Image (spheres, rainbow, N blue to C red):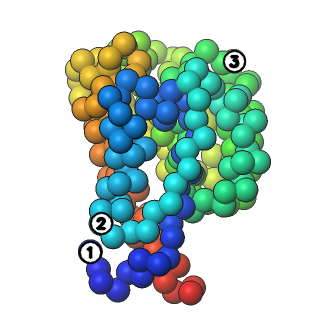
Amino acid sequence: MNKNINKQETIKILFLGESITVGQGADTIRDNYVSKTTNHFKNLGFNIEYNSISKGGMTSTWGITKIQEVINYKADIIIIEFFINDQYLSAETIKNNYSIFSAIPYGEIIIFNIYDNVLFNNANQNITNINLNLQDSSRWYKKIDTYSKLPKNWGTYLVDGVHPNNYGYSILSQILIDEMTGLILKIQLQKNIVK
């Protein structure tokens, strides 16, 4: 780690999602992707503060009811994860919900699309591609479609066809870490310049 990084400068990360963001299927809270990801960056010497606004069974429609909480937290990075449950929403609802997310005034937004076993095995079906396209916005720092990054036997890492086991959460965390590392460094550098 670069000794010039000021550990006093806090990077705030907010996770907004459903049961996978809660960590259902993990043995303990420290085994979910939220804990593994934030602990990785803390272990590198970054001063990470995070908040998780998440609830099992929810869709992006529930997520937009939490917009004021998201705005109030003033996170540097916002990670939104509702893809699995959004498959049951209408196209119009998905488009409207992600349009509202795109109006969040603070933070770099990452859309983190995670697959259950059914979606993963049918990833080329039109419904999957349509739902991914409905999320499109120039506001996103990044949209992570995990399909190509997950192992071919992804279903074996799911405890019930939907929720990952501990190793599955490690895989998701590593995907997120790989996509976030450059952003974390960029934010830290900006904070050091501004202070």
Which label sits in the foreground, 2 or 3?
2
**Closer-to-camera residue (116/28):** 28
Q: Is residue 72 above or below residue 173?
A: below
Amino acid type indicated by mark 1: Met
Query: Circle 1: is it few (<14), some (14-19), or many (20+) Cα within 10 Å?
Result: few
Amino acid type indicated by mark 2: Leu
Which label sits in the foreground, 3 or 1?
1
Amino acid type indicated by mark 3: Ser
The kind of secondary structure element at disc 1 is loop
For the residues labelled 3 and 1, the Cα–Cα distance comes to: 46 Å
**Residue for badge 3:** 90
**Residue for badge 1:** 1
In the image, 158: left or right of 65? left
In this orientation, does residue 152 appear?
A: yes
Query: Circle 2: is it few (<14), some (14-19), or many (20+) Cα within 10 Å?
Result: few
**Residue for badge 2:** 44
Report the residue at 35% width, 42% height from top: 30
Tell me the quadrant of the picture where the N terminus can be found.
bottom left
Disc with the residue nearer the chain's start (2 vs 3): 2
Question: Looking at this rendering, what residue extends furthest in the front direction?
Answer: 28
In this orientation, does residue 149 appear?
A: no
The kind of secondary structure element at disc 2 is loop
